[in-house]
Amino acid sequence: MKAQRTRSQDRILNLLKTMNRAVSAQDIYVELRSRDQSMGLATVYRSLEALKLEGVVQVRTLASGESLYSSVQQDKHHLTCLQCGDSIPINECPVHNLETQLQQSHSFKIFYHTLEFFGLCDRCSIAPVASENS
Ligand SMILES: [Zn+2]
Ligand SMILES: [Zn+2]
């Protein structure tokens, strides 16, 4: 089912497709303004909501509570460091086949899935958290 998109929704979707990383609504707002396509932050949020329900935009919420948006084509997963907040993309999807299976067995139209791994990155696992005896 293809909904009729507004011009704002089109602009946001095009922007997300050209960025190869997930961005916050605030980033989108700033980026659009720099491209002479500025729109209010409320419109950005409303458009993102509509695109999300259409299944073309996905949201990822960071440990900090910030929401990052990306276009759904990218089936990307991340290793997120709990200490420094670094987010390392991984280039494989271990559940791709499962998704196909679930769509069939549950007759459920899956738009996307999320899968994230949390822990400590290389740098943070070496450095002590609170250095009491330094
Ligand atoms: Zn780290
Ligand atoms: Zn995946």
Image (cartoon, helix red, strand yellow):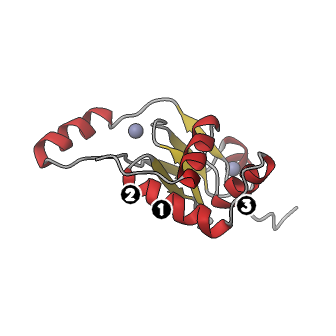
Q: Nearer the viewer, residue 130 or 105?
A: 105
Respond yes or no on whether mark 1 lies under 8 Å from ligand 2. no
Q: Do the residues labelled 2 and 1 touch (CB within 8 Å)?
A: yes
**Label 1, on which residue?**
49
Local crowd size for mark 1, using a 10 Å CA cut-off: few (<14), some (14–19), many (≥20): some
**Residue 125 seen:** yes
**Residue type, label 2:** Leu
Secondary structure type for disc 2 = helix
Q: Could you say whether the residue bearing mark 3 is in a helix, strand or loop?
A: loop
| Nearer the observer, 79 or 60 | 60
Mark 1 or 3: in front is: 1
Q: In the rendered image, which residue does mark 2 sit on? A: 53
Residue 119 seen from this side: no
* Image coords of residue 112 (percent x, y): 37, 46
In the picture, measured across the screen, residue 99 lies left or right of residue 58, that is: left
Measure the alpha-carbon separation of dots 3 and 2.
41 Å
Quadrant housing residue 95: top left
Compare marks 1 and 3 and give the one earlier in the sequence. 1
Quote the CA–CA distance across marks 2 and 1: 6 Å
Where does label 3 land, which residue? 129
User: Image point 63% across, 35% down: which residue?
Assistant: 18
What kind of residue is marked 3?
A: Val
Above or below for 57 versus 134: above
Give the camera-side residue of 34 and 113.
Answer: 34
- Of residues 95 and 125, the one nearer the viewer is 95
At horizontal 77% and vertical 53% (from top left) the residue drawn is 33
Residue 46, above or below 59:
below
